[in-house]
Image: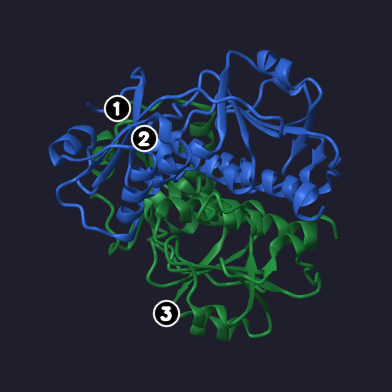
Chain colours: A green, B blue
């Protein structure tokens, strides 16, 4: 019953991501499972309410939870069928070969926090349906459209008319000096944690550097993405 | 031999943080320990060179490493005496009760990446000398001055003439609208991951909000700090 990447189902662990699942993807839910030891908190009441509204079944079954979850401090599990998203006509974040589930979850949470609706991921990639990623995203994963692609070239066909910004340590333009055209749609592209973007991928757009001191090798990937989304938001939405 | 918070020594695990230790705090080092299985890479040559220059002893002792480290993929350990830092006359980051070592390490790496020299931490706090924090900081911890204080009130006595910015979800001023006075020194203050800043601490400065959508509860702490440091850098240094 433990989560397996190849399975067609996955799980939310804990109240917070389960609430987000119920709010955003109710039709994908198989069932909500409560532990026998669950205390009735406000979150639990909210889950019961949302489940009722959406016709989602809740069962109390501590044994089942312990088969699904390793830790014994999880009292709520949401079981859902993995689903396919569709992109909407809006800006993009693109991650090329992200390898860390914690980073991926944090990036998703940040992206949703700044109103990003589309996340393209180039394979191979950390599993975004893994409960670990879902937890790191605090359930924000259910509020963003995610699709994977075989290569950047393939993804690029869907965003031919977008401005593409490739974040790289050899970027010629500093993010802090960049003037963004508010009337153009954009895609922000980030490489793998260890290896960055390949020359081939970088050739599709404008290379951007988030300038930092020589005292560190590079910024953490999720920090870089957070800063980039903030700056783009600031110039295109917040101060429009 | 495993690291203990109460001990007077701590360790760097792996080549990267050990190089930073040698570069920045050579006098605090007791010894460098190599595994018998260590391959001679460029990093290893660099460590040997830096150790020689600084009169630091290297010993090859795989058994000792396995007593210090849990994982068996660590081949280099730096053993050092915990040291006391002094602040310099410059800007500050202040963390009130940070509780997560991974977050703390990432914040330190980001702060060093943007040239921050002083980090004040209000107790109780995650242990910044824990090898986990050091690793998350990628060794950047050896390039920043850290001191802890009993309370914000106590720390505040040392920065009476600084502009203080308190990052809080009830901030009245958006970071993206803030105009920073380039001629004033500043301290950016952030609360605990779960509980944020208390009303009392917030009363010492100007409350700032990093605006995000209602789709998420809050931004991750290290992401918020990354964005804040970037914006302050942009306005005060990068585009001076």
Q: Is residue A193 above or below residue B198?
A: below
Callout 1: chain: B
Q: Alpha-carbon neighbours of circle 3 within 10 Å: few (<14), some, or many (≥20)?
A: few
User: At numbered mark 1, what does the secondary structure look like: helix, strand or loop?
Assistant: loop
Labels 2, 3: one chain: no
Q: Is disc 2 placed on a helix, strand or loop?
A: helix
Tell me which residue sits at (50%, 83%) in the image: A200
Counting residues from the start of the chain, the first of labels 2 and 1 encountered is 1
Q: Position of residue A115 (x, y in %)?
A: 67, 57
Q: Which residue is mark 2?
A: B131
Is A91 located above or below residue B31 in the figure? below
Q: CA distance from mark 3 to mark 1?
A: 44 Å
Give the Cα separation between the discs numbered 2 and 1. 8 Å
Give how far across and how far down residue B238 sits, in percent: 75, 54
- Please state which of the two labelled residues, at mark 2 or mark 3, is closer to the viewer: 2
Task: Give the residue number, with chain letter if any, for mark 1.
Answer: B3
A101 lies left or right of B183: left
Q: Are marks 2 and 1 on the same chain?
A: yes
The residue positioned 42% from the left and 29% from the top of the image is B129
Name the chain letter of the residue that bears numbered label 3: A
| Label 2 with label 3: CB-CB less than 8 Å | no
Q: In the drawing, what numbered circle is on residue A149?
A: none
User: Residue A208 is drawn in which quadrant?
Assistant: bottom right
Residue nearer the viewer, A24 or B218:
B218
Tell me whether the residue at label 2 lies in contact with that at label 1, contact meaning CB atoms closer than 8 angstroms.
yes
Query: Residue at 38% of width from left, 37% of height from top?
Result: B132
**Residue B207, position in %: x, y?**
78, 31
Q: Is residue A11 visible?
A: no
Tag on residue A150?
3
Marks 3 and 1: same chain?
A: no
Judge left or right: residue B216 versus residue A132: right
Q: Quadrant of the image for the C terminus of chain A?
A: bottom right
């Amino acid at each position: 019953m433990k989560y397996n990447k190849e399975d067609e189902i996955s799980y939310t662990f804990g109240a917070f991501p389960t609430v987000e699942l119920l709010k955003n993807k109710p039709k994908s839910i198989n069932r909500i499972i409560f532990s026998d030891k669950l205390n009735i908190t406000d979150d639990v009441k909210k889950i019961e309410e949302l489940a009722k509204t959406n016709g989602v079944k809740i069962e109390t079954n501590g044994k089942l939870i312990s088969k699904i979850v390793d830790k014994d401090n999880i009292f709520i599990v949401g079981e859902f069928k993995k689903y396919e998203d569709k992109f909407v006509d809006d800006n993009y974040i693109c991650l090329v070969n992200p390898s860390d589930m914690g980073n991926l979850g944090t990036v998703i949470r940040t992206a949703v926090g700044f109103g990003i609706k589309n996340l393209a991921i180039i394979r191979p990639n950390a599993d975004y349906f893994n409960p670990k990623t879902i937890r790191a995203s605090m359930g924000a994963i259910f509020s963003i459209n995610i699709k994977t692609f075989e290569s950047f070239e393939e993804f690029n066909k869907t965003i031919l008319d977008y401005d593409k910004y490739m974040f790289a340590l050899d970027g010629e333009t500093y993010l802090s000096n960049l003037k963004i055209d508010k009337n153009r749609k954009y895609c922000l592209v980030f490489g793998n944690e260890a290896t960055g973007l390949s020359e081939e991928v970088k050739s599709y757009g404008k290379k951007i550097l988030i300038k930092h001191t020589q005292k560190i090798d590079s910024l953490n990937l999720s920090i870089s993405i957070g800063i980039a989304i903030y700056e783009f938001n600031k110039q295109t939405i917040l101060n429009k």
